[in-house]
Amino acid sequence: MTISTPLLQASEKFKTWMIHQALPFWSSTGIEATTGASHERLLTDGTPDLQSTKRIRVQCRQLFSYCIATEMGWMDNGLETVNGIVGFLNQHAINPHANSTFMHLLDKDNNPLDDMQDLYDMAFFFLAAGYRYKVFNDLTALAQADALLAHIENNLKVAPGGWMEGNYNAPVRRQNPHMHLFEAFLALYEATKDGKWLAKAGEIFCLFETVFFDAEYQVLREFFSDDWQHAAGAKGQIIEPGHMMEWVWLLRKYQQFTGTPVEKYCQALYNNALSLGQDKATGLLFDEISPTGDIVSASKRCWTTTEMLKANIAQAWAGDKSCEQGAADAIELLFKYYISDSVAGSYIDQLDGNNNVAMELAPASTLYHLILACIEAVKYCEQ
């Protein structure tokens, strides 16, 4: 199949940056030499923020990033880096109140700071475990995933569907942790071919169809009450175009595994993310809009552009060749607005409403978005 020249060229540029700048930088400067942990974030000069706390979900996201980079043949030190983070988690972050879970937050000296059990954190532990097993045949990782699944089923599963935000009182329920559980369960199914993981993903697809997708406005809802009604007030009206794009990619993956027809959802989410949520001056996506396209937050996170890239690739795989140009454009937007010119391998996380840098620190968590988007583009171009 002939692939457009702009996408081939943009994809190669992205791959080169990822292999020769981003991965070497984050797997060296981004790693705490004494413990093997990932630093939470780097400062503007590319040095670690040694005063920052450490979120365990970030450790899991970095674990995933280094696993998938190793799978692609893009890292020589992948196993060493992964083992370092796993060792750190086992030594510093196991939750004493539930050994199948980890702490939520450690202080700058790696002491426990918050033992909250959080569903969003757990989603990334599942994802990392799936790839530890897939890439390194890590049976311990698979056993940990099984134990964690039993934990959330027994402790966080609630009617009328889905899981609680965690073992704490939350003001709203969110689609976002469930979206990432969907991603993780699909990854675990792909790695193991064990149908229980696909069944769990199916439960979340049911939630998407009945709760998260707003059939009236053809958008994705974010925040809900305990019984999955739209959250009250302004909170319930927040729409994130980036998440709409992310669901396009996930739905296409679910379709590959199950044959489920998702075309109407993908077209609606993709088209409305662009028509309602795109800044026409830059081509970037706004962080938050209303169901009718009013701008709620004109800032623009880096990850929304990576998800726009992934959605375009997913739509191109599904047969819409015009999306190749959208994918190429998204890569160029990453380099224009977010990839750092001053620190090789680093990036900018967020722009403000005037497209100036709003967040100068480089959070490690953004690497997960960038490497996934890069790999999706490269795999499409290398088909």
Image (cartoon, helix red, strand yellow):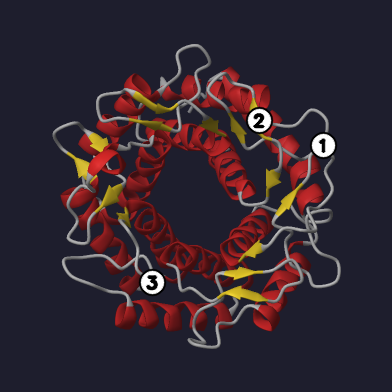
Q: Which residue is mark 2?
A: 338
Q: Residue at x 61, y 42 (%)?
A: 370
Q: Earlier in the sequence, mark 2 or mark 3?
A: 3
Q: Is residue 201 visible?
A: yes
Name which quarter of the figure residue 312 lies in: top left
Verify CB contact (< 8 Å) between mark 2 and mark 1: no
Q: Quadrant of residue 330?
A: top right
Decide: marks 2, 3 in contact (CB < 8 A)? no
- Residue closest to the eye, 91 or 296: 296
> In the drawing, what numbered circle is on residue 168?
3
Tell me which residue sits at (74%, 59%) in the image: 39
Q: Does 23 appear above or below 202?
A: above
Seen in the image, is 280 located left or right of residue 244?
A: right
Does residue 321 appear anywhere in the picture?
A: no
Horizontal and vertical percent for residue 156?
32, 75
User: Residue reaching furthest front?
Assistant: 233
Residue at horizontal 30%, vertical 56%? 172
Label for residue 344? Answer: 1
Left or right: where 373 falls relative to 42? left
Question: Picture coordinates of residue 304 (x, y %)?
Answer: 49, 35
